[in-house]
Amino acid sequence: MECYECKKRIKEFLNDSMKSKTCVEFIDHVRSCDECYEELSIEFLVNEGLKRLDNATSFDLESELKNKINKSYSKARFYKTFIVICSITIAIVAFLLGLFLSTLFGY
Ligand SMILES: [Zn+2]
């Protein structure tokens, strides 16, 4: 993923509205690019900070962001793998069904 696309998608990530495939690419990029990570943490701090202005309890937003990244990453990785396994299973089932039908009708 390019920096330009990464920065464009920060809000999407913070709203949890990102697709798994994009999410893995996004996090891979953010982890390897200081500039985009910086941008993400600023957006996160502003977003969460504003939400919690009324809340007197102290919070550690930096580690919360790291948590969010880690959680989103494992979730996205899981769904991505899950989707691949599903697609393979469907392909195999379709193949076997085709085989079965062709033997059934003698084609
Ligand atoms: Zn970048």
Image (cartoon, helix red, strand yellow):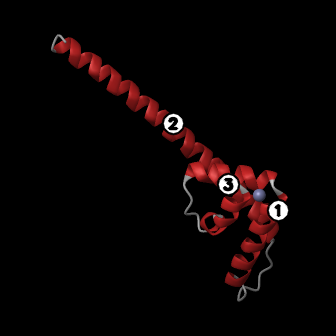
Q: Quadrant of the rendered structure where residue 107 is?
A: top left
Q: Quadrant of the rendered structure where residue 97 is?
A: top left
Which mark, residue 82?
none
Percent position of residue 17, x then y: 55, 63
The one nearer the camera, 1 or 90, is: 1
Q: Tell me the distance, in whole angstroms, between the alpha carbons under discs 2 and 3.
A: 19 Å
Percent position of residue 76, x then y: 60, 49
Residue type of the residue flagged with mark 1: Glu
Mark 2, other Cα within 10 Å: few <14 / some 14–19 / many ≥20: few
Residue that lies at the very extreme toward the left in this rendered image = 105
Percent position of residue 66, x then y: 77, 60
Residue type of the residue flagged with mark 3: Phe
For disc 2, the marked residue is: 84
Q: Tell me the distance, in whole angstroms, between the alpha carbons under discs 2 and 1.
A: 32 Å
Q: Is residue 106 above or below residue 68?
A: above
Q: In the image, what residue occupies the spot 15% across and 14% down?
A: 105
For disc 1, the marked residue is: 35
Q: Secondary structure at mark 3?
A: helix
Q: In the image, what residue occupies the spot 81% across and 55% down?
A: 33
Q: Tell me the distance, in whole angstroms, between the alpha carbons under discs 3 and 1.
A: 13 Å
Which mark, residue 26?
3
The earlier-in-sequence mark between 2 and 1 is 1
The earlier-in-sequence mark between 2 and 3 is 3
Report the image quarter containing ligand 1: bottom right
The earlier-in-sequence mark between 3 and 1 is 3
